[in-house]
């Protein structure tokens, strides 16, 4: 296990090729095929993302880096069904975010960057219960799902606290617990290490390991130089709208 | 577990969230009720000055304006969705809702529920206050029928609120919403009968759902005579609901789809 910010010792790109040959006969979980995204209606100028192809298989964690404004968040939002691609296709287990939206979104866990995205006057418990409902966790499983989320990110001492009384790191842990709460197939993490201390990074690392061990897929986006705590199966960078194998 | 039940459960979660957030400001509920009681008190004393051939006695004007005010507060609550959506966008919480199976449209529709339910309770409190303090004459035999009519009116006004919500998603502002509310107050017969309006503007009282809703509710709650038959007013209101609800949901879905395509769905 690597410390936060440390670079894996394995040669970048080699892992990806080996992984691909090992999974040659398996169907990818997430597929991006020729995805292009412009800002605005008119599709003028340079696209944010251009012809992105990506296939991610079950049980893998992928790191995507890039400079500020490179298009990492846009890529996550496209994969998460928040934005629609101008060109190309996106599918998760063969489902389209456009045509099978509800089933697609049930399989997504999404963490946005920054400390926004929480209700300041709601307690941690209420956030977890609300998200269990909004994520369509069946009522019989909600209690267990919330308990797992609490244990996964060490939220027990914070349950009754309102979000506006939490530190930034505690808020980040709550946001992470919401992303993992419904045991999604695909976890999309935008700068997940923000504000986390060593314990928080360790909890996140364990959560990711458990997630990939049960066949889940994870994408971790962060600026170049913040590679995250895991020996990722694949590593990419976004440069000039293109997704490139890191180090290639 | 059917999908419908999962949607209902998620919507209930949003309603609970809105209730907890609303009541976390402890004086907010009290000030709203007290504010309405003050307004009703002022209009009681204003009504003592009214000697109108159109409405008759001061008591009849008071009954007329009380129902207009409480119903306006209920129907106005349908216009809170655009404001709530803007708050969600600024707070970054809408992102999570779009990424959920409930979806943006489901979340926006759920956001309408708590303000409308709460405003109904405030309206009932206002009527009880007017009854106890000013001896407002309530027609108990027909008053229960006011509930389904208020629901229809709420649907019609919630739809107009959704149209403005679609505008917030597409244009990042609910342009003209306050003008619409002010205009409805003028031509909808909140403070005075629409028959007093000059002929050239009276048509405006017939092309929006507030007038038939408030006419019916006044008739059911305090026995104010209807300008048309009850069925005619009901069908007019129903017609607005049948047209406005699908139109609003369709435009909201279109605005969301367009904003996801243009990349502006999370901008504010």
Image (spheres, rainbow, N blue to C red):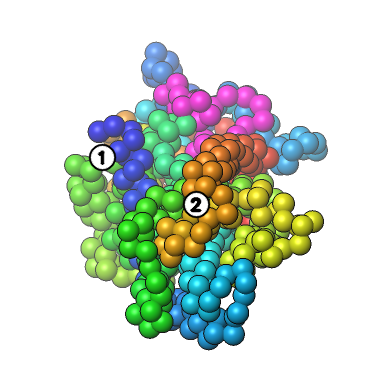
Res A208 label:
none
Q: Position of residue A20 (x, y in %)?
A: 45, 21
Q: How busy is the neighbourhood of tag 1: few (under 14 within 10 Å), some, or many (20 plus)?
A: some
Question: Which residue: 34% across, 80% down?
Answer: B132
Whether residue B107 is visible here, answered yes or no, is: yes
Instruction: Say if A11 sits above or below A170 in the image.
Output: above
Q: Nearer the viewer, residue A15 or A29?
A: A29
Residue A98 in magenta? yes
| Residue B250: quarter of image | top right
Q: Which residue carries the number 1 mark? A: A138
Question: Which residue: 44% across, 51% down?
Answer: B149
Whether residue A9 is visible here, answered yes or no, is: no
- Count of marks, rendered view: 2
Res B153 label:
2
Question: Which residue: 30% across, 38% down?
Answer: B5
Q: Nearer the viewer, residue A181 or A1?
A: A181
Q: Position of residue A205 (x, y in %)?
A: 34, 49
Residues in magenta, as a range: A78-100
| Residue A198: quarter of image | bottom left
């Amino acid at each position: 296990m690597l410390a936060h910010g440390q670079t894996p010792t394995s040669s970048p790109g080699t892992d990806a090729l080996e992984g691909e040959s090992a999974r040659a006969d398996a169907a990818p979980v997430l597929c991006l095929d020729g995805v292009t995204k412009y800002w605005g209606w008119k599709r003028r100028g340079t696209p944010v993302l251009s012809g992105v192809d990506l296939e991610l298989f079950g049980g893998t964690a992928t790191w995507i880096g890039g400079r500020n404004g490179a298009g990492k968040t846009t890529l996550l939002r496209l994969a998460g069904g928040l934005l629609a691609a101008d060109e190309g296709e996106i599918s998760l287990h063969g489902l389209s975010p456009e045509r099978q939206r509800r089933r697609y979104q049930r399989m997504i866990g999404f963490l946005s960057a920054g400390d926004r995205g929480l209700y300041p006057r709601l307690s941690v418990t209420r956030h977890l219960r609300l998200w269990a409902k909004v994520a369509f966790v069946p009522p019989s499983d909600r209690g267990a799902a919330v308990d797992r989320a609490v244990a996964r990110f060490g939220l027990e001492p914070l349950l009754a606290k309102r979000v506006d009384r939490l530190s930034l790191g505690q808020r980040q842990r709550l946001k992470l617990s919401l992303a993992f709460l419904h045991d999604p197939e695909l976890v999309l993490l935008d700068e997940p290490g923000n504000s986390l201390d060593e314990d928080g990074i360790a909890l996140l690392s364990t959560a990711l390991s458990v997630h990939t061990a049960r066949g889940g897929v994870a994408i971790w986006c962060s600026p170049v130089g913040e590679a995250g705590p895991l020996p990722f199966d694949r590593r990419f960078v976004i440069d000039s709208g293109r997704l490139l194998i890191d180090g290639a | 577990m059917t999908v419908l039940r999962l949607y209902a459960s998620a919507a209930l979660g949003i309603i609970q969230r809105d209730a907890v957030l609303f009541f976390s400001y402890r004086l907010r509920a009290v000030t709203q009720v007290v504010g309405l009681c003050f307004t009703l008190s002022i209009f009681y004393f204003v009504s003592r000055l009214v000697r109108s051939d159109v409405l008759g006695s001061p008591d009849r004007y008071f009954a007329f304006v009380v129902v207009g005010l409480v119903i306006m507060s209920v129907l106005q609550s349908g216009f809170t969705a655009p404001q709530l959506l803007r708050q969600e966008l600024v707070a970054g919480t809408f992102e999570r809702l779009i990424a959920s199976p409930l979806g943006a449209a489901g979340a926006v529709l759920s956001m309408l529920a708590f303000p409308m339910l709460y405003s109904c309770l405030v309206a009932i409190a206002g009527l009880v206050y007017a009854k106890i303090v000013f001896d407002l004459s309530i027609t108990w035999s027909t008053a229960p029928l006011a509930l389904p009519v208020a629901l229809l009116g709420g649907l019609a006004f919630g739809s107009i609120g959704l149209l403005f919500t679609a505008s917030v998603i597409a244009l990042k502002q609910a342009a003209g919403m306050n003008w619409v509310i002010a205009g409805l107050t003028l031509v909808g017969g909140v403070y005075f009968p629409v028959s007093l309006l000059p002929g050239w503007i009276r048509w405006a009282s017939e092309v929006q759902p507030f007038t038939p809703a408030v006419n019916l509710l006044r008739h059911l709650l305090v026995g104010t005579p209807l300008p048309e038959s009850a069925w005619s007013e009901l069908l007019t209101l129903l017609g607005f609901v049948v047209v406005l609800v699908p139109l609003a949901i369709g435009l909201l879905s279109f605005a969301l789809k367009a904003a996801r395509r243009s990349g502006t769905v999370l901008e504010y």
